[in-house]
Amino acid sequence: MGLKRIAISTFVSVFALCSMNTVVFAENSYDYKIYDQEEQTLANMENAEKIGGVTISNVISYDVRHWGESNDKIYYDVDVEKGAYIYSDSDNTQFMVAISNSFYDLESEHNVMTTDKGYTCPLYHYDIGDRSITAFPSTKNSNGTWSEGLTWQLNFTDVGYTSIRVDIEDESYYYSFSEREKPAEKTPLILENTDKTTVPGDTSSNDSINEADHNEIDVASMNSYENIKEIDDLPETALAIPTSSKVYVDGKEVQFEAYNINGSNYFKLRDVAYAMNGTSKQFDVRWNSGISILSMTSKGSSKGVVEVIPNQVYTVVGGELKSGDGRTKKGSKMYSPVFVGENSARMAGYNIDGNNFLRLRDIGKLFNFYVGWDNNSVIINSGSEYNG
């Protein structure tokens, strides 16, 4: 998923012609048809996923991102096909969209529109239809929320993206939905063993690599709510203690500069790529200056990103597998994700002496290779799947 917007826009448009002192909510005049959600709506929910608090159909991909003055809030950045549905299977649900398409207005419930309430001022009247949304409500509760079955369809007629807040009981979820065409079916990436580079210290031939082996890049699990929350809970700074354990890659000992931070091992991504070269899980690492990470604050903003290219021979830049000085250091938490094509993958990392170190098990999870512990040694095996 590309970096298209953070969906936290400042409200500048003809809406500014309406005085904030004259804002009132008005019942819109739509005659909504209440129908059997289970048989009709859910029947159309292809490629449906439960993301946050709602089920979303026609999902292409999604990321969990941050917004807010302190980058302390999350939202789900979801790419869907035109006509996708969002559906709540919970009681006491409310969907809302702001005329400014702003998370800040949604947070304050300022200038918002719901299924049956529009926005009216002396000059204009708006409702959710003006944001290319069709509502199929269920039964309204006495407290003004909807019972199980509230559904919106996102048509993207005149808008490129739509920011929506979903309230379920006392929990609020924020979403930024963008229209995207379903990608054409692709042939799985197959490793073509054209390079004969061996893992450092390995004198065996690479001719035995099965051409059916290929990288199964797992961006989705890296961007799961649970993984993002775990990463966000990591301390801003931490002691980085040099890893004293031996490290074996496909049975061969390899010397890394690695650190143990709060019980987890952290490695340089380029070092891992160098060591995995010639295996079925090889990948290249590049710096892409054409992508920027934007944030509402200076924290987390950056020019350029690290990009990995699966199934590519690693390009040596020099300095790989350089030994450390054996001293305990201070690590500062990383915020920039790693990019795999157009998709960003959030990974736990710390900057140590100007170098970025990523959690080894996150690298293994992303590229689906085994990371384990045996006889006080770190084990990396490209021929086995990630063990969770």
Image: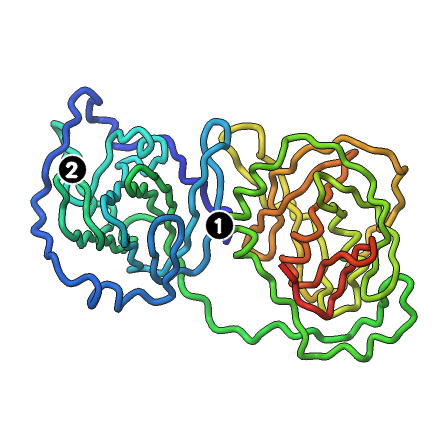
Instruction: Give the residue type that dot 1 points to.
Output: Asp
Q: Residue at x 60, y 51 (%)?
A: 339
Give the mark nearer the N terminus: 1 vs 2. Answer: 1
One can see residue 318 in this view: no
Q: Which mark is residue 63?
A: 1
Q: As rendered, which of 189 and 256 lies closer to the eye?
A: 256
263 in relation to 200, above or below: above
Q: Residue at x 46, y 53 (%)?
A: 62
Q: Which mark is residue 143?
A: 2
Q: Residue at x 40, y 53 (%)?
A: 51
One can see residue 305 in this view: yes
Q: Is residue 185 left or right of residue 313?
A: left
Q: Is residue 209 left or right of residue 113?
A: right
| Picture colour scheme | rainbow
Q: Is residue 370 left or right of residue 135?
A: right
Instruction: Give the residue type that dot 2 points to.
Output: Asn
Q: Quarter of the image for the C terminus: give it.
A: bottom right
Q: As rendered, which of 125 and 373 lies closer to the eye?
A: 373
Q: Residue at x 86, y 45 (%)?
A: 244
